[in-house]
Image: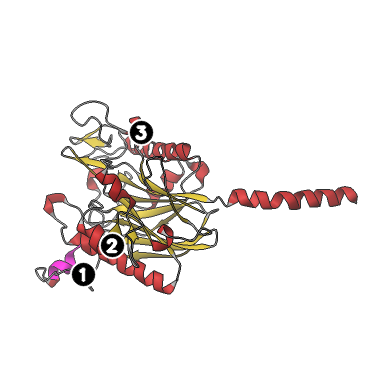
């Protein structure tokens, strides 16, 4: 009987520490544009024809498997650097749930046990946003696929006809609300309208406005909620979409009520970049946090400095992810270059932040 009691006492002493291991005090939250992660099959209603075996890109199973391996290799490399898997990883430029399931099943990252949140959206090219999460740390409560609308807005769209508005299609914004260690979080994952052909000067600010409006509603509905906005914004953190319509501030000290902290703004000014275009570095892969994460009390989750230089964000860049030769040397090693498959990773580097207690 004494032996049984001793075993029970030992288990009781061990249990709190085991539980503590399951609930870490720091969490990595990041975003990665996967650059056209398409499978080799046609999806009805999607313009995926160039990513078919007989399409422009001659997108074979071998190329698809190489792409999956490459994406998983980057995610694993980030985990190795951080000593843990991302708790939350938002992704963009994915075709469907099938490619997400194939990705999380890759041997490099299968041990992370990532779960998926995804909705099929209306984008004409057929790409969506999605979110991976570790279920032992994050418990989802509600999910939304937020469509692009033109109202209500401070932006003047009077030059657009109603037919043009009705026919416009772009990616929905994904919102996932849930808890980490009992604290309420909401994560927005976005891929705002493209800059191709000089387009989107008003559309990206409107996309940011849509996110901000929904975030403000959540703050009223759930006082104290921590909010993280992430995505390929197709704008820099210094552009009006992020500074005015997302109310992104460069420092925590200058934040007022309703503002977001934009840690990659100071990094852009310091010369960092997540993608390069015509010899210029940009950070389109942006993460912002609301006041509850920027100015949280000591006993709650808040954004933490990531490196010795004092930045609150990181652009994850490794040699194997970077073009080593040729005219694009030093830029992200992408999947295609000049229309040819070169077997790289993505034309974007991933970005992430850390929240801690």
Please name the residue that numbered disc 3 is placed on.
318
Disc nearest the viewer among 1 and 3: 3
Q: Which residues are magenta?
A: 163-170
User: Residue 234, how many percent across, how many down?
Assistant: 23, 52
10 Å crowding of disc 2: few (<14), some (14-19), many (20+): many
Q: CA distance from mark 3 to mark 2?
A: 31 Å
| Colour option used | secondary structure
Please name the residue that numbered disc 1 is placed on.
150
24 part of magenta stretch: no
Of the numbered discs 2 and 1, the one sitting upstream in the chain is: 1
User: Residue 5, how many percent across, how many down?
Assistant: 85, 52
Along the horizontal axis of the image, is 165 left or right of 219?
Answer: left
Residue 160 vs 40, above or below: the answer is: below
Q: Which residue appears farthest toward the top when viewing the image? A: 325
10 Å crowding of disc 3: few (<14), some (14-19), many (20+): few
Give the structural element (helix, strand or loop) at label 3: loop
Task: Tell me the quarter of the picture where residue 269 sits.
Answer: top left
Residue 314 vs 241, above or below: the answer is: above
Q: Which mark is residue 350?
A: none
Please name the residue that numbered disc 2 is placed on.
247
Look at 20% across and 26% down and name the residue there: 326
Q: Which residue appears farthest toward the left when viewing the image? A: 159
Give the structural element (helix, strand or loop) at label 1: loop
Asked whether 5 or 297 is in front, the reply is 297
Of the numbered discs 1 and 3, the one sitting upstream in the chain is: 1
Residue 232 vs 142, above or below: the answer is: above
Of the numbered discs 3 and 2, the one sitting upstream in the chain is: 2
Q: Are marks 3 and 2 in contact (CB under 8 Å)?
A: no
């Amino acid at each position: 009987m004494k032996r049984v009691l001793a075993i029970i006492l030992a288990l009781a002493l061990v249990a709190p520490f085991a539980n503590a291991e399951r609930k870490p005090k720091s969490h990595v939250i990041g975003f990665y544009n996967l650059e056209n992660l398409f499978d080799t099959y046609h999806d009805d209603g999607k313009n995926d024809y160039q990513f078919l075996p007989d399409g422009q890109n001659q997108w074979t199973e071998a190329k698809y498997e190489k792409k999956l391996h490459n994406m998983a290799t980057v995610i694993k490399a980030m985990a190795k650097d951080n000593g843990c898997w991302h708790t939350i990883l938002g992704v963009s430029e994915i075709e469907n749930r099938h490619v997400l399931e194939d990705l999380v099943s890759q041997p490099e990252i299968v041990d992370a046990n990532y779960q998926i949140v995804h909705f099929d959206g209306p984008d004409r090219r057929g790409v969506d946003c999605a979110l991976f999460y570790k279920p032992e740390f994050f418990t989802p409560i509600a999910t939304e696929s937020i469509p692009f609308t033109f109202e209500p807005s401070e932006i003047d769209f009077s030059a657009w006809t109603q037919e043009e508005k009705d026919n416009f299609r772009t990616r929905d914004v994904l919102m996932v609300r849930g808890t980490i260690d009992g604290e309420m979080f909401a994560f927005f994952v976005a891929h705002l309208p493209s800059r191709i052909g000089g387009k989107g000067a008003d559309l990206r600010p409107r996309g940011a406005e849509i996110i901000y409006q929904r975030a403000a509603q959540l703050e009223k509905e759930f006082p104290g909620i921590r909010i993280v906005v992430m995505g390929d914004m197709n704008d820099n953190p210094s552009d009006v979409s992020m500074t005015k319509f997302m109310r992104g501030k460069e420092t925590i000290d200058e934040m007022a009520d309703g503002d977001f902290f934009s840690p990659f703004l100071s990094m852009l000014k310091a010369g960092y970049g997540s993608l390069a275009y015509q010899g210029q570095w940009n950070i389109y892969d942006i993460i912002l946090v609301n006041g509850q994460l920027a100015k949280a009390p000591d006993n709650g989750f808040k954004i933490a400095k990531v490196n010795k230089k004092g930045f609150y964000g990181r652009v994850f860049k490794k040699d194997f992810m970077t073009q080593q030769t040729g005219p694009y040397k030093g830029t992200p090693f992408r999947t295609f270059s000049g229309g040819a498959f070169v077997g790289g990773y993505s034309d974007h580097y991933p970005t992430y932040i850390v929240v801690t207690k």
